[in-house]
Image (tube, rainbow, N blue to C red):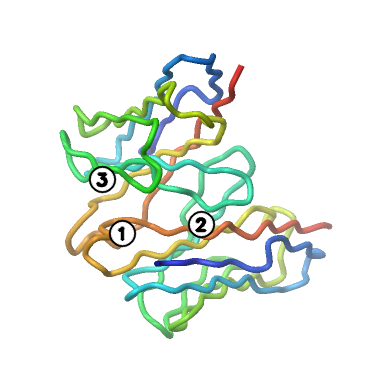
Amino acid sequence: EDQVTQSPEALRLQEGESSSLNCSYTVSGLRGLFWYRQDPGKGPEFLFTLYSAGEEKEKERLKATLTKKESFLHITAPKPEDSATYLCAVQASSTDSWGKLQFGAGTQVVVTP
Amino acid sequence: DGGITQSPKYLFRKEGQNVTLSCEQNLNHDAMYWYRQDPGQGLRLIYYSQIVNDFQKGDIAEGYSVSREKKESFPLTVTSAQKNPTAFYLCASSISGGGESSNQPQHFGDGTRLSIL
């Protein structure tokens, strides 16, 4: 069965203190790995898609990387506005998982001034 | 501005009552999805639709029903058979649900929070 595990569950950072979030996955062939940001009371906002091991994507202070077993979301010199829950989701390439995303439980990040 | 609109933002259900959550998109996406989000858990798929007039059960479809009569609209009904309906419900869409475009990202609305009176 496809599984996605995110760690840590929660992360408290000082402004400017860089850190990384982990997303470990077990799927029968990866079609895509997706990162989302979710603010309280809002829907997830799409950040990145990664398709193959070794791929990297960047957006402002965020950088996502992918290996065959896990993905990291690196937050460089975070600001308070980076506070959110970050969700990871994977899509398997098996034919009976059409379009389906398997989500992790998320990492709640709080950045204090 | 293209996007996904969910309404209402908050909804209360009385025991024995069916309630319907609205989801409309103007992104011209073929595929639409309904998820349920509970604290400490990942999003779980309720129903999805690849194309108009077609939809499939997800992982937790019991107690829910959907329709897809128009490309833009994918309403979700939470029936009285759903014994634990209190949750945050999220609607999403993507360009296509199958084939070569199936790995395109899903885009989400801002959710409906359903509570029991």
Check the image and report above or below for A13 versus B37.
Answer: below
Q: Amino acid at mark 1?
A: Gln
Residue sitting at 37 percent across and 51 percent down?
B106
| Alpha-carbon span between mark 3 and mark 1 | 11 Å
Q: How many marks?
A: 3
| Secondary structure found at label 2 | strand
Q: Is residue A18 left or right of residue A3?
A: right
Q: Which residue is mark 2?
A: A36
Same chain, labels 2 and 1: no
Q: Which chain does the residue under circle 2 lie in?
A: A
- Secondary structure of the residue carrying tag 3 is strand
Chain letter of the residue beneath label 1 in the structure image: B
Contact? badges 2 and 1 (CB < 8 Å) = no
Q: Quadrant of residue A15?
A: bottom right
Residue labelled with disc 3? B31
Residue A108: image location, x then y, percent:
68, 56
Mark 3 and mark 2, same subunit? no
- The residue carrying mark 1 is B104
Q: Real-space Cα distance between discs 2 and 1?
A: 13 Å
Q: Name the spot of residue B44 as percent of width and height, x first.
A: 45, 48
Q: Amino acid at mark 2?
A: Tyr
Q: Amino acid at mark 3?
A: Ala
- Chain of the residue that carries numbered disc 3 in the rendered image: B
Q: Secondary structure at mark 1?
A: loop
